[in-house]
Image (cartoon, rainbow, N blue to C red):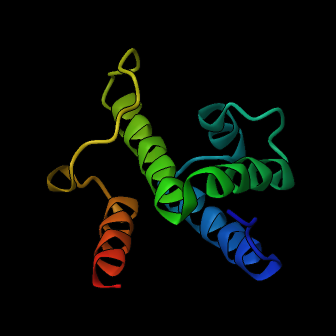
Amino acid sequence: MAALTTEQLDELQSFLKDWLRHSGRTQADLRRALRASSIRMPVLLDELDRTYRKDGLVGLAERLCEIEDLWHREDSGEVDALPTMSGPEDALGQLDLLLEEIRLDIGDA
């Protein structure tokens, strides 16, 4: 699959900054969750772009949902739990809703 376009990367960067701000997280938190080599936004975007190229938009949304799930578990003291993707019925936030919307859109196509 092709890489994200410059416009898509700009939108993803804007989304990530808003998501981090609203969730009370930092780029360092995102770096740890992604297992990226740096907290710099271009490095984080490159890691997410690799996910997109490998697994498409659904894979990218799933990865972000897994990160949000991990953060929720960390906040509730379940830091030893492995990040997994639960079903849509276990939606934990905006990213789960986004993933469900993407799945619905793909089903309509």
**Horizontal placement of 49 versus 38: left or right?**
left
Front one among 106 and 99 = 106
Q: Residue at x 58, y 56 (%)?
A: 20
Q: Position of residue 31 (x, y in %)?
A: 70, 38
Q: Position of residue 37 (x, y in %)?
A: 82, 32
Residue farthest toward the top in the current orientation of the protein: 80
**Horizontal placement of 5 versus 52: left or right?**
right
Q: Residue at x 39, y 14 (%)?
A: 80
Count numbered badges in the picture: 0
Q: Is residue 6 above or below residue 96?
A: below
Q: Is residue 103 above or below residue 91?
A: below
The quadrant where residue 76 appears: top left
Front one among 75 and 98 = 98
Residue farthest toward the left in the current orientation of the protein: 89
The quadrant where residue 83 appears: top left
Q: Is residue 2 above or below residue 105?
A: above
If the image is split into quadrants, where does the N terminus sit? bottom right
